[in-house]
Image: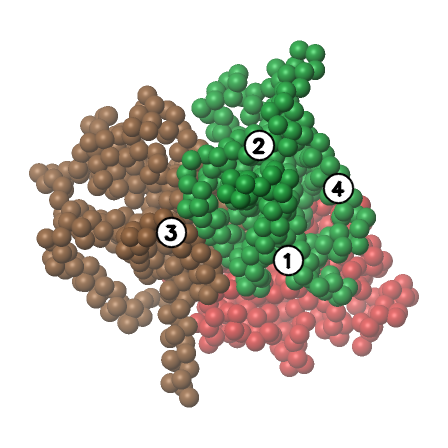
Chain colours: A brown, B red, C green
Amino acid sequence: MGFTKRQMIVTLICFAAAVVLPIFFRGSRYYMNLFNLAGIFIILTFSLNYIHGYLGLISIGQAGFFAIGAYITAGLTMGLGINYFPALLLASIAAALAGVLLGLPASRIGGHYFVLITLAFGEIVRLIILNWKEVTHGTNGVNNIPPPRLGPLLIESRFAYYYLVLFFIIVTMVVAASVRRSKYGRSMLATKVGELAANVMGINPLSTKLINFGISSFFAGLAGGLYASYIGSISPEAFDVDLSVDILTMTLVGGSGTIPGPVIGATALVFLKEWLRAVKEYYMIIYGAGIVLIMIFMPYGIMGLLRRVRDVISSREVR
Amino acid sequence: MNTSGGALIEVEDLGIRFGGLLAVSDVSFHVSEGSIHALIGPNGAGKTTILNMISGIYRPSRGKIIYGGRNIVGLPPYMVTREGIARTFQNIQVFEGLSVLENVMVARHVRTSVNLLSTILKTPKARREEKSIADKAVEALRFVGLADRKDMDAMNLPYGQKRLMEIARALATEPHLLLLDEPSAGMNEAEVLNLVNFINQIREKGITVILIEHNMRLVMKISDRITVLDFGEKIAEGPPEEIQNDPRVIEAYLGTENGYA
Amino acid sequence: MIQEIVSGLSIGCIYAMTGFGFVLIYNAVGAVNFAYGEIVMFGGYFGYLAIQSFGWSLGLAFLFSILAMAGLGIFNDYFAYFPMRHRPVVTVIIASIGLSILLRNSALAIWGPDPVKIKSFVGDQLVHIGNVVFPLHQLLIFIVTAFIFVGQVFFFSRTSIGRKLEATAQDQEMAKLMGIKVNRMILLTFVLAACLASIAGFLLAPLWFLEPDVGLYIIVKAFIAIVIGGFGSVYGLMAGGLFLGVTEVLVASHLTSEYKDVISFLILVTVLIVLPQGFFGEKVAEKV
């Protein structure tokens, strides 16, 4: 069950392209910014990809884990003076713990309740950030978050940040691929399509889901930590339900449960949002209608569409 | 574990209510180690309900299930499987989207120990374990004759082969006791003959079998002992030749389409 | 204290009213409708539109709202449910999230972000009972909610169309075999739920302000009420709504107003952990 040769080649070409891409855009702060945001959203989309793609559940609370990652990274680097990278790791672990903790009640319940409880979680986190002013500074937010320092190297420019994000995207993807091809990934997929049958086959549904939530929120937290130091300032309104819905849309547009899906979905939406800024008032209306239309016409996202095209072509070749 | 010939599982006064309805009441039977024990009875007699109670899906309202010397009532299904009881389903349960091999590999996980971090980091131990999962799964598939189908999407298997895959999956958990719920349903004559062969081979491996079946020829041919249920109650028990001539059994079956062949 | 409880009960009634329509749709299509909060909000906004832009009276505005909402119910069915009726439930849930974004931002584009208000049918009058003073509108909320509550129970158990709807909700295949036109019944459910939302919107608007975000707020609260009561039980929903309303008001005035909503969410999480089937719900066994 390894990669096929074609998958390997496509993957390598994509990575090579990703590595050389900023060389052409180095002069454009505008595009470098979009690339970096897309990168952070790719990681964030991978986090929901676990929950939706591997367990079939919908979360609209990912912004909560993103916020935990962002605020804890900021707090550890600014408040305690810890180096960025250990701080990022600790923040991601904290987000993972929050995910497991939320998973304890959430994994006992069916799909409908799950959406609700994640929504509640995201709102609880946002409300706490908003109101716990002594620590989070409420609506003023946390400002002047220092850029990451790697030994003597200060990762400050958008160009340098691009490679930092790219590194973490690769880590995220490697982990995603290795989870999918492991006993944990199989247990999740079996639980997704037949929880009771999987249970009878010896799969503990609770631990399977908790592991899923843990990995998922770890990466949401990681994305949050990257975001905090990249933007340099964070405030509660950046972490509302709309962000969680964005992540959901990115997951669906790309094609959930696949490895290329989150990359395609996040990149497409970051750019689409940017280009539609001209029609700002109507943008969100189109966006909402777009979600419904995607569900009607391409429920398996762009990856599903590609797969269908491929199937049509290969069935023609046979004839 | 009990010595050979002793009871591997003892079902004592088992009963369950759904809403106000008594689906199974005071059913007791013992299954001796290494035997094939059939549960028969008309539709709605409570056979599958009993299997569901043994495998931990339903919690009985009363009674005990003594397995390996202890009461397993209240254990969740995955723990029951870990204890060595595996099963197949009357309505086939295929893990959609997974290959045939992966479907069977899932059943091996209960016998694995490598943790998450080692798995993600792909340590040598994790690689070894993953390989052993695959090897054992292939072995189980080979046993039921599906090894050459291992890379197919399991959903695309023909019906009879899905049933065989379920048996392979159950065997992959390394059970002491195997619960088969109507394994011959939807199989053709040749496949049924094949099945008889498998069940006998399974017994030769030392695995005890509880079998629910409507195909009476199959039941009479391979069972060591038969428990007959009707309306949730046990109405007879004994070896096949005795059951065949029991007037209560004949009465219970009269007028049903599943009469004796 | 009594005043607070009365006010809490009236808020609870709004939660329960929202819950009624929501559960109606949930029973019919087996999926939660995230857009229902926005639908309630539109019930109020349509009234505001008729009063503010057309200059109509409150009564006419209410009629207009009911009619417009019936249209919105049809739109909800044909756009965000019908095309996906054979797909996994998740698809329908996500579509409803899309619809909720569409509606919320349409409201923002049409009526702007500033809160607006519509008057109550009973004006701003106050009621004095002994030492207790409360707005007459709260009394109206009690009466209307009680009426809808009883009417709903009667409708589903006594009328033929209600029984058909109930049969559809319980088992679509069975209903089809009984000769019930299932798709039409579902359409009717969406319309009915939307009209109920119109009433809820008119009760809500004088109590709070209407603003584009109120839909999300109200749907989450209705949800919590449903979970407390247990999915599927109207009595539970009513009790859950009242409990939540009173708790919120008491928490806000005696404990913390900043963390009032956090406490509501914590109630939700606690109920889900301790009593996943709610106080009135039945536990349903999964079938193999």
Residues behind callouts 4 and 2 on a single chain: yes
Report the Cα–Cα distance between label 3 and label 4.
40 Å
SS at badge 1: helix
Query: Around disc 2, counting alpha carbons within 10 Å, would you say few (fewer than 14), some (14 to 19), or many (20 or more)?
Result: some
Report the Cα–Cα distance between label 2 and label 1.
31 Å
Report the Cα–Cα distance between label 4 and label 2.
25 Å
Give me the residue at 71% from left, 64% from top.
C181
Q: Quadrant of the N terminus of chain A?
A: bottom left
Residue C119 image label:
2
| Residue to which mark 1 is pinned | C187
Marks 3 & 2, CB-CB < 8 Å contact: no
The amino acid marked with disc number 3 is Tyr
Sequence order check, earlier mark of 4 and 2: 2
| Residue to which mark 4 is pinned | C151
| Residue to which mark 3 is pinned | A282
Sequence order check, earlier mark of 1 and 4: 4
